[in-house]
Image: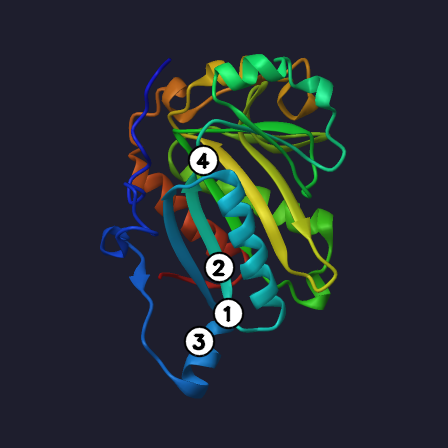
Amino acid sequence: MVQHAALPGAERCGRQDASCNTLHGLKPSSTEHGREAHDSLLNSLSVRILGTIDYQEAWDLQRRLAEARRHDEIGDTLLLLEHPHTYTLGRRGNPDNILLTPRQLARRKISVYHVDRGGDVTYHGPGQLVGYPILKLPPSDLDYVRYIRDLERALLLAIRDLGVKAEFRARFSGVWVADEKLCAIGVKIDAAGVTSHGFALNVDVDLEYFRHIVPCGIPDKGVTSLRRLGVAEFTKPSVMLAVTDRIAEAFGLEAQLT
């Protein structure tokens, strides 16, 4: 099995050592109080770098943050992280699109979760940049398709910022390079307009794990990564910074590390 280093700024940080949450180009959050602090929440995107975290733990965290965001106890938040080897199936996901038996999954130490996002089956693992935006969309923007398109556009621009000639594909979500998906998207928006789940960008991931599923339920398309594309200019911190900047820009926010 190919071994990959953790994403930068994610070297077991977040939960264990907040001092390593440094990403050049983003400002640390201030310690404002009272009305000033409340006002700053309205246009800020709190970026939390969590390191490698179990899928269930991250899902539970998303639900807690979404509940807090519904009640305006926190502002908009972006979680950046990696997962151990995991397959997830969306609400309408077809279990037959996982091509391994339960015994084979256990032998390979791959977890499987049925989750409440859109989309079919996808893979999460070391070498991906996984992002979960917890945003409260205004009533005028409370549209599932529009949100996906806004998120897609932000990720497309971030990937192009890294020098990749990425594109959209008609009828398929995500960001593509020719017939290969580079970034998968699957989201949820609740009745209050609060988002959860998000995207998985293949940075330096072991693509063999995609061979054991029908990725996103699309049998005739492939999967690629920044490493496989031979992108000369990218570093892992630059990927996180590009993605964070473009997501903040897309939703009119100012990104701050927390």
- Callout 3 environment at 10 Å: few (<14), some (14 to 19), or many (20+)? some
Q: Please tell me the numbered disc located at residue 77.
A: 2
Identify the amino acid type marked 1: Ile
- Callout 4 environment at 10 Å: few (<14), some (14 to 19), or many (20+)? many
**Residue designated by label 1:** 74
Q: Position of residue 144 (x, y in %)?
A: 72, 50
Sequence-earlier tag: 4 or 1: 1
- Distance between the Cα atoms at labels 3 and 1? 11 Å
Q: Position of residue 183 (x, y in %)?
A: 53, 32
Residue in the image at 53% along x and 42% along y: 56
Sequence-earlier tag: 4 or 2: 2
In the image, is residue 187 above or below residue 212?
Answer: below
In the image, is residue 126 above or below residue 241?
Answer: above
Q: Nearer the viewer, mark 4 or mark 2?
A: 4
In the image, is residue 12 above or below residue 36?
Answer: above
Q: Is residue 251 left or right of residue 245?
A: right
Q: In this orientation, which residue lies closer to the viewer: 34 or 143?
A: 34
**Residue designated by label 4:** 83
- For the question of whether residue 24 can be seen, the reply is no
Q: Please tell me the numbered disc located at residue 56.
A: none
- Distance between the Cα atoms at labels 4 and 1? 24 Å
Identify the amino acid type marked 4: His
Q: Nearer the viewer, mark 4 or mark 1?
A: 4
Sequence-earlier tag: 3 or 1: 3
Q: Are marks 2 and 1 in contact (CB under 8 Å)?
A: yes
- Distance between the Cα atoms at labels 4 and 2? 19 Å
Identify the amino acid type marked 3: Ser
Residue in the image at 45% along x and 35% along y: 83
Which secondary structure lies at badge 3?
helix
Sequence-earlier tag: 3 or 4: 3
